[in-house]
Image (spheres, coloured by chain):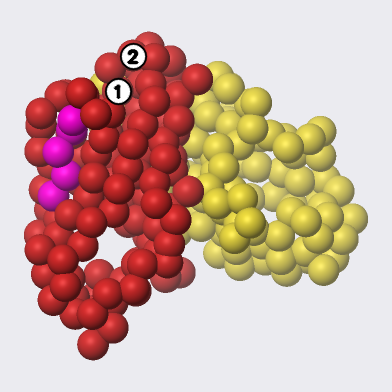
Amino acid sequence: GNSVTQMEGPVTLSEEAFLTINCTYTATGYPSLFWYVQYPGEGLQLLLKATKADDKGSNKGFEATYRKETTSFHLEKGSVQVSDSAVYFCALSDRGYQKVTFGIGTKLQVIP
Amino acid sequence: DAGVIQSPRHEVTEMGQEVTLRCKPISGHDYLFWYRQTMMRGLELLIYFNNNVPIDDSGMPEDRFSAKMPNASFSTLKIQPSEPRDSAVYFCASSFNIFSGNTIYFGEGSWLTVV
């Protein structure tokens, strides 16, 4: 079946540091890939997505590239801010498997 | 445009009581999801509907849980009887044509505490 594996947190960074959160996936078909973000006390919201191989999703300074050869979709940001402190979820939706699968979430804490 | 609306936002109930959580999806969306989030188990898919029909309920933990979607604009998740281990945040989410790479939109969650 499908699965998403992402690094466990928490990840603690100083403001303006470089961020990478790893995500790898297993899917039976050709999935679409997503990063969702959850701020404290709120629901998840889409951060970025990519629907085919080599696509790059980007939003709010975050980027992730759909790498089919390594089945990865790592999230990166060049300079994090305190306001980026949240939980980040990698996810995939698979047309063939009719499933939406989320990773366990990675908590990011950015300190001033 | 209103997002996914859930009620109640917070509920505290005693063990053994019935709990009903409600959800209004975004108009026009044909998929509706119910998720549960806990510290121990993370985000779990309980059930999802397509065009008001339950498609996959394999995540529903046991017979105490039931979900309905009587029409395109309303869904309920019911727990009867409730137990302390049901304490969690329950999210409703909706999407249009999800398997074509579209976004899932989440509500703000219903925070349930069973004492």
Seen at 36% across and 31% down, the residue is: A25
Instruction: Specify the colour of chain A.
Output: red
Residue placed most toward the observer, A103 or A51: A103
What chain letter is assigned to the residue under label 1? A
Q: Does the magenta stretch include residue A64?
A: yes
Disc 1: which residue? A31
Q: What residue type is labelled 2?
A: Gly
Residue placed most toward the observer, B28 or B9: B9
Local packing at callout 1 (Cα closer than 10 Å; few below 14, some 14-19, many 20+) is many
Whole-percent x and y of residue A72? 26, 35
Whole-percent x and y of residue B87? 71, 60
Above or below, B18 against A38 in this view is: above
- SS class of the residue under badge 2? loop
Disc 2: which residue? A29
What chain letter is assigned to the residue under label 2? A
Outermost residue, right side? B16
Residue placed most toward the observer, A5 or B17: A5
- Asked if labels 1 and 2 touch by Cβ distance under 8 angstroms, the answer is yes
Q: Which chain is yellow?
A: B
Q: Which amino acid does label 1 sit on?
A: Pro
Query: Can you tell which quarter of the image residue A67 is in?
Result: top left
Q: Is residue A80 rendered to the left or right of residue A10?
A: left
Q: Is residue A83 rendered to the left or right of residue B109?
A: left
Q: Give the range drawn in magenta.
A: A63-67
Can the viewer see residue A60 in this picture? Answer: no
